[in-house]
Amino acid sequence: MELYNDGDHICVVFRDLVQGEAVQSNQFFIYDHDHAALIDPGGELTYTALFMALSEYINVRTLDYVVASHQDPDIVASINKWMMGTECKVAVPALWEKFIPHFTRPGKTDGRLIPMPDEGINLRLGDIYLKALPAHFMHAEGNFQFYDPISKILFSGDLGANLGPEKDLNKPVKRLAEILPYMEGFHRRYINCNKVCRLWANMVRDLEISMIVPQHGRAFKGKAIPEFISWIEQLECGVDLMTQDNYRIP
């Protein structure tokens, strides 16, 4: 599904490539003036269908980047195939740089990894810079989100993940209340603590955002965006909720 297309700049989300027992996940493609990046391409379940879908837009072998928000299998387990089938560089959090080669054949990552420092980075893509924004501990220790300055879309990774009915995946969330039952439990368990939620909210509140698109579930649009930022800012989660009852010998 195209999220944005002005002829020179295109943003696409693929939402239906994972079937069966695995968790639903979204993959993202950004194209600008004959250059392209793939964000969080997923694992074996998505590779073939995603490769074919990208071929409608580009010669896939010339893909500039595979960009990984963090190290989870549903993010980047297919990286060996992308490195074999394309000329891409792979941008990963510096914290996970030494872990990514475990997904690949020996020597395959030599000279092709771009470690993203904790403070973030601007990745040149065609005529733009794709911004890697710090989102550490939301939920991975080294974690990034990606902001496209043309479409104003924030690709938020696991933050905002919502696991509702698949029939609604292409319907943007316009008010937060309609999606909370499908996301609250996930965020309370998978996000580290309220402190990082508040730091993140302070970072993005004044950013011009047309859409927040998480790695799982539906996108947020309109009033749902400030509502989500305010909700996450106040959320108690992760270690905030832990007590001695969670640490007992079974």
Image (cartoon, rainbow, N blue to C red):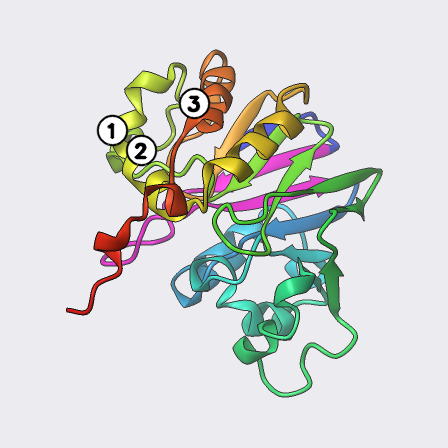
Q: Quadrant of residue 130?
A: top right
The amino acid beneath tag 1 is: Pro
* Residue 1 visible in the snapshot: no
Q: Image height check: is 65 above or below 102?
A: above
Res. 197 mark: none
Residue bearing mark 3 = 231
Q: Is residue 21 magenta?
A: yes
In front: mark 1 or mark 3?
3
Q: Residue at x 45, y 47 (%)?
A: 192
Left or right of residue 15: residue 13: right
Residue bearing mark 2 = 184
* Residue 172 visible in the snapshot: yes
Residue bearing mark 1 = 181
The amino acid beneath tag 2 is: Glu
Residue 101 percent location from the top left of the image: 60, 77
> Is 168 or 182 nearer to us in this picture?
182
Residue 143 percent location from the top left of the image: 58, 51
Q: Which residues are the magenta region?
A: 9-31
Mark closest to the chain's N terminus, 3 or 2 = 2
Residue contact at pointers 1 and 2, CB within 8 angstroms: yes
Q: Residue at x 38, y 29 (%)?
A: 170
The amino acid beneath tag 3 is: Trp
Mark 3 surroundings: few (<14), some (14-19) or many (≥20) residues within 10 A? some
